[in-house]
Amino acid sequence: MPVPIPRQRAIPAVESGQAPAAPKDAPSKEAPRKEVTVDNNATTQLSLLVIEDDPGGSTVVPELLDSAGKPIRVRTARNLTEAERLLTDDVHCILLDLALPAPGRSDDDELAVLRHVLELAPRHAVLALTASGDAERGAEAVRVGAQDYLFRDELDGRLLSRAIRYAVERKRSDTAERRLAEGRVRAQENRRLERGLLPTPLLEGSSLRFAARYRPGRSRALLGGDFYDVVRTPDGTVHAMIGDVCGHGPDEAALGVELRIAWRALTLAGLCGDELLGTLQQVLEHERSDDEIFATLCTVDIAPDGRRAGLCLAGHPSPLVARPGRPARLLPYDNNGPALGLLPGARWPRMQVELGAEWSLMLYTDGLIEGRVGDGGERLGQDGMVAMIRRQLSEGLRGEALLRAAVNEVRSLNGGELADDVAVLLLDREG
């Protein structure tokens, strides 16, 4: 931020072309909450809060006008206690006397009162008021966070009016720039989460084909708590997993990443079935931010010959299997155990299932089956999903095309974006 040159300019830099001004008609990038903003084309009246030990003796001209010629409202406070009471959301700018004492601050800090006001009003524009012989202090005030500084003995109504408008617009510009930077940081963080939640499968040496699809729910453009993984262990067994942490915030997404990474490490270390899920429950219990958080999980371990598999369900929907010449159906789910994190000391039976020589196995999260069907309250459910997949398979859809069609049709039946995230993975074996 450029520091104004004292005494060599009668108006702020933005008025003389030395600094860019925010476009007059530019839309605000502020979030939809109570915020200090100004719209030069609307009927909003600018408001100034003067914090000075003797406002009545100030050289400030009472008649202050905004760019449309409307009066700028002025409030006065003799100290910070009064200022805090008068500092409401309709105040756009603060004119602060740097000579005021700040409560509880060191006397050695010449800008203690400014730091106090910046903490008190982080969303307001601030103009620092100082003596004409104290230009260095005014420049330092800008470096600390004020939008501009003014000399007390050079002040007039025209200069102050322009300085207020400049400070408010500069604050808006700074706020928009800060939020843009924060948005970039969040996007980077979400990309890291995405790499953790949706990893590259480790299937080297396996003849199985893999496909996956993820779609966030309508309330998010980024990932939620759904996660999956597929790895092949040295003995030739292919292990697949899909899970869902309850909730959709960044904490739930981070927990999903931790569970997926833990699952991969434990699987490669040789754990399987009940022992694996019991260890994952311990991880969840140690890492979750709230005792009410739980996760559902489905794990499948496919034998090296590809003809049979072990299945464990922890409160999760059962996978769907499709074989040539037979209608697609759900794998058995009679021994479905509880979700992870619900019951201490729970057990998760491992069921043995026969797959045959040629098959397709689809694992999914409940977002695929909980969408609405039409205008009523009826949900698609597992039976509706099975019927949909059977029809799509009969139309010749396979692999990525099948998953894409399934997710798109569920969304269409729902009448728009789904409320919950959807994750689906597909493993195919050709005879």
Image (tube, helix red, strand yellow):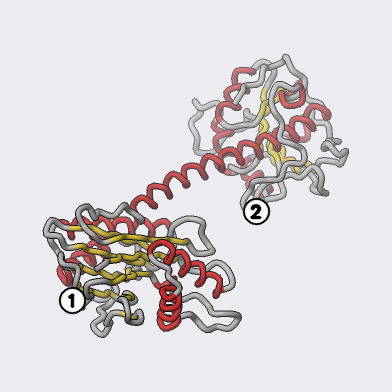
Q: Residue at x 71, y 31 (%)?
A: 21
**Cβ–Cβ below 8 Å for labels 2 and 1?**
no
Quadrant of the image containing the C terminus: bottom left
Left or right: 216 as drawn, with respect to 60? left
Residue 393, placed above or below residue 252: below
Q: Earlier in the sequence, mark 2 or mark 1?
A: 2
Residue 234, placed above or below residue 384: above
Could you tell me how far apart the alpha carbons at marks 2 and 1 are, in whole angstroms? 54 Å
For label 2, the SS is loop
Where does residue 302 sit, x and y in percent of width and height? 20, 68
Q: Is residue 340 visible?
A: no
Q: Mark number for residue 350?
A: 1
Q: Nearer the viewer, residue 381 or 151?
A: 381
Q: Nearer the viewer, mark 2 or mark 1?
A: 1
Q: Mark number for residue 34?
A: 2
Where does residue 402 sit, x and y in percent of width and height? 42, 67
Count of marks overlaid on the render? 2
Identify which amino acid the numbered label 2 is placed on: Lys
Left or right: 259 as drawn, with respect to 232? right
Left or right: 49 as drawn, with respect to 350? right
Residue 275: quadrant of the picture: bottom left
Q: Residue at x 30, y 76 (%)?
A: 323
Q: Is residue 276 visible?
A: yes
Q: Residue at x 18, y 76 (%)?
A: 350
Q: Nearer the viewer, residue 337 or 214?
A: 214
Identify which amino acid the numbered label 1 is placed on: Arg
Where does residue 215 sit, x and y in percent of width and height? 46, 61
Residue 97, placed above or below residue 121: above
Left or right: 186 as drawn, with respect to 338? right
Quadrant of the image containing the N terminus: top right
For label 1, the SS is loop
